[in-house]
Image (cartoon, rainbow, N blue to C red):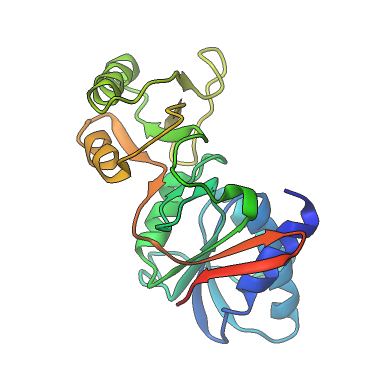
Amino acid sequence: MSVELKIEAARAALALVKNGMRLGIGTGSTADEFVRLLAVEVKNGLEIFGVPTSIKTQILCEELGVPLTTLEELPELDLVIDGADEVDGKFQLIKGGGGALLREKIVAHASKAMAVIADETKLVDTLGEYPLPIEVNKFGLTATYNAIRVVSDRLDLSGEINLRGGKDTPFETDGGHFILDASFSHIPDASALSKALLDIPGVVEHGLFLGYAKVVFLASPDGVKQLGEL
């Protein structure tokens, strides 16, 4: 996705932001472009209360002068604007490519609505070609991996499940957890997989975002298409 397309998707979503809004601010390269556009509007007088979904986003907002608060101060938000790694026709998402899926989902759950910004290649018929991030506790990692493998076999999901970063230098999330990336290729029943994964004690959260997105902005060389509405 070119920077230009990311900017155009972000600009379309920016139109949803109203003065005084309690706003969740997503994580990722497209969300970064949204932050940059948002910062310009803040300098021009827009007042918002922003809650970042990662330390990375927090740092960028602070550098650009976007006012921030926390979910402790504002536990209910009006809107979260975030990117996605995949989105299907039911607005089901795979997120977490940047490793912020736990905080992203907490913020999405605290928001009245979610708007997704992405390019047209992220729209798929069925989720799964993008590896599904599964955030796991460090303790009992092998046992948790084995349990995930049992679940995937039961649901007829095949493919490799890899520790992000590898055993020598594993990626660590803002919450101090590891991520297993599951290359299932095809997830016909996202709801069943979601429930089965969350039944595993070592699984902290996963990157299936089901029932959160209300509107999706998809950028292409021909412009930005809006799917759904708030």
Residue name at image x 63 percent, y 57 percent: 31
Residue name at image x 57 percent, y 79 percent: 17
Rendered image quadrant of residue 41: bottom right
Q: Is residue 19 left or right of residue 210?
A: right
Image: 161 above or below 131: above
Q: Is residue 130 left or right of residue 222?
A: left
Q: Position of residue 97 (x, y in %)?
A: 55, 39
Q: Nearer the viewer, residue 73 or 94?
A: 94
Q: Nearer the viewer, residue 5 or 108?
A: 5
Image: 132 above or below 151: below
Q: How many marks?
A: 0
- Residue 59 visible in this rendered orientation of the protein: no
Q: Is residue 122 left or right of residue 220?
A: left
- Residue 54 visible in this rendered orientation of the protein: yes
Q: Position of residue 197 (x, y in %)?
A: 27, 34
Q: Position of residue 181 (x, y in %)?
A: 46, 28
Residue name at image x 43 percent, y 40 percent: 175
Quarter placement of the C terminus: bottom left
Q: Nearer the viewer, residue 126 or 142?
A: 126
